[in-house]
Image (spheres, helix red, strand yellow):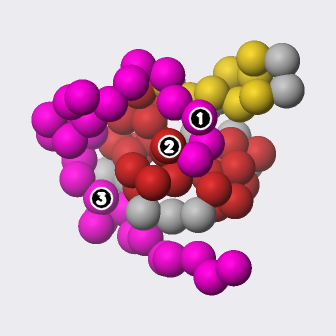
Amino acid sequence: MTGKIVYLSDVPSATETRLFDGVPDVMDVGQVAELLGVVAMTVRREIARGCLESTHVGTRVRVTKTALLRYVGEGEA
């Protein structure tokens, strides 16, 4: 499996919420990976590092739209 490197400068800023219009308020790892243009393992690593907030629902991992906007916005600092 080959991953894609995405620099935070390539991701639109969190203030551009239009990017996430039409996106569910709660997403699974695969959906987040697709939005960011990375593989699911990259999302899981960011969650494990504590960089991306998530919630566990049973054995499943969910990421809120708010957490994703916060994660994208932190790259601007």
Task: Name the residue rendered at 24%, 28% in the picture.
Answer: 22
Q: Residues within 10 Å of mark 1 (few under 14, many from 20)?
A: some
Q: Residues within 10 Å of mark 3 (few under 14, many from 20)?
A: some
Element type at marker 1?
Answer: strand
Residue 70, visible in the rendered structure: no
Q: CA distance from mark 1 to mark 3?
A: 19 Å
Q: Which residue is mark 1?
A: 28
Q: Amino acid at mark 2?
A: Gln
Task: Name the residue rendered at 23%, 47% in the picture.
Answer: 13
Task: Name the residue rendered at 41%, 19% in the picture.
Answer: 25
Camera-nearest label, 3 or 2:
2
- Contact (CB < 8 A) between labels 1 and 2? yes
User: In the drawing, what numbered circle is on residue 11?
Assistant: 3
Q: Earlier in the sequence, mark 1 or mark 3?
A: 3
- Is residue 40 located in the magenta-colored stretch of the structure? no
Element type at marker 2?
Answer: helix
- Where does the image place residue 5, in percent across and percent down from the top left? 49, 76
Q: Which residue is mark 2?
A: 31
Q: Quadrant of residue 11?
A: bottom left
Residue nearest the viewer, comparing 37 with 73: 37
Instruction: Write the start and end of the magenta stretch as one range.
Output: 1-30
